[in-house]
Image (cartoon, rainbow, N blue to C red):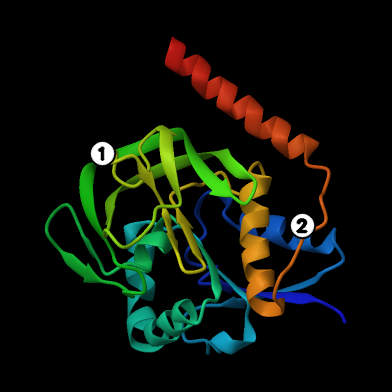
Amino acid sequence: MNRQIKICHLYPDILNLYGDIGNIITLKKRLLLRGIDCTVQNISVKESLYVEDYDIFFIGGGQDFEQEILLEDLLVIKKPLIKKAVEENKTFLAICGGYQLLGNHYKTWDGVNLEFVGAIDINTIGDKKRMIGDYIFRCEDEKGLFDVVAFENHSGKTYISDNIKPLGTVIYGNGNNGIDRTEGVRYKNVFASYGHGPLLPKNPRLADLILKTSLKQKYGDWDLIELDDSLETKANNIMIEKIKYRIKK
């Protein structure tokens, strides 16, 4: 039986900051190296979305202006479809602005309240001060804890409800809001993060956690063939050491 994962890239022409397309490239490459077929379909404004056709949904980052461009299409057409996909345990990777869009609302620093999808019980409040820089957060998979390194650049402070788990715990940097040391969200099969870079190329364990989640949902129990991640792991370690060096200075 041929295995296949279908990825839906939502609003790729609008939410495309900081090379976030690299996350899709990473997921696809890691599937193909294991002999698993992968297709990617771009879906944007005024284009039909059939959530049952896809296994993984990716939403990248964008600035406030870009988010406003797609809001009508998102709220009028795609909101119920995205909520349905989340509740049916489809796998999502949402980065920065895409992460915020999955929440309830975004209140700008000057008091404008923007309604979002409401697929996850989180709320974001804009601030005049941006949270920028390399950061480290700690995640967990079936093997144990591992450190993720990425780049954050956001003014929105996201607060997650008590019944929502964070994706990880901030070791260095700001994460969701710079206060409670939470980073991102892990809800059902949703992985959401402020991590740019792009996030996945130098964090292979996180990439494989996302893939295993999707494969298990589609095909049942699934063990991924181990890949040679020496270069990816080296990149991860180098970045972590650089950040630790800055801390010491």
Q: Residue sitting at 56 percent across and 43 percent down?
A: 197
Q: Which residue, given by chain and number where applicable, does mark 1 sit on?
A: 179
Q: CA distance from mark 1 to mark 2?
A: 35 Å
Residue occupying the far left of the picture: 111
Determine which quarter of the picture holds residue 103.
bottom left
Q: Residue sitting at 58 percent across and 39 percent down?
A: 146
Q: Residue sitting at 50 percent across and 53 percent down?
A: 17
Question: How busy is the neighbourhood of tag 1: few (under 14 within 10 Å), some, or many (20 plus)?
Answer: few
Of residues 214 and 100, the one nearer the viewer is 214
Horizontally, is 195 left or right of 24 in the view? left
Residue 138 versus residue 124 in the image, above or below: above
**Percent position of residue 23, x then y:** 62, 56
Q: Earlier in the sequence, mark 1 or mark 2?
A: 2
The residue tagged with tag 2: helix, strand or loop?
Answer: helix
For the C terminus, the quadrant is top left
**Percent position of residue 11, x then y:** 50, 72
Residue 210 versus residue 126 in the image, above or below: below
Q: Is residue 22 visible?
A: no
Q: Residue sitting at 52 percent across and 15 percent down?
A: 245
Tell me whether the residue at label 1 lies in contact with that at label 2, contact meaning CB atoms closer than 8 angstroms: no
Q: Which residue, given by chain and number where applicable, does mark 2 sit on?
A: 30
Of residues 221 and 132, the one nearer the viewer is 221
**Percent position of residue 24, x then y:** 65, 61
For the N terminus, the quadrant is bottom right
Determine which quarter of the picture holds residue 129.
top left
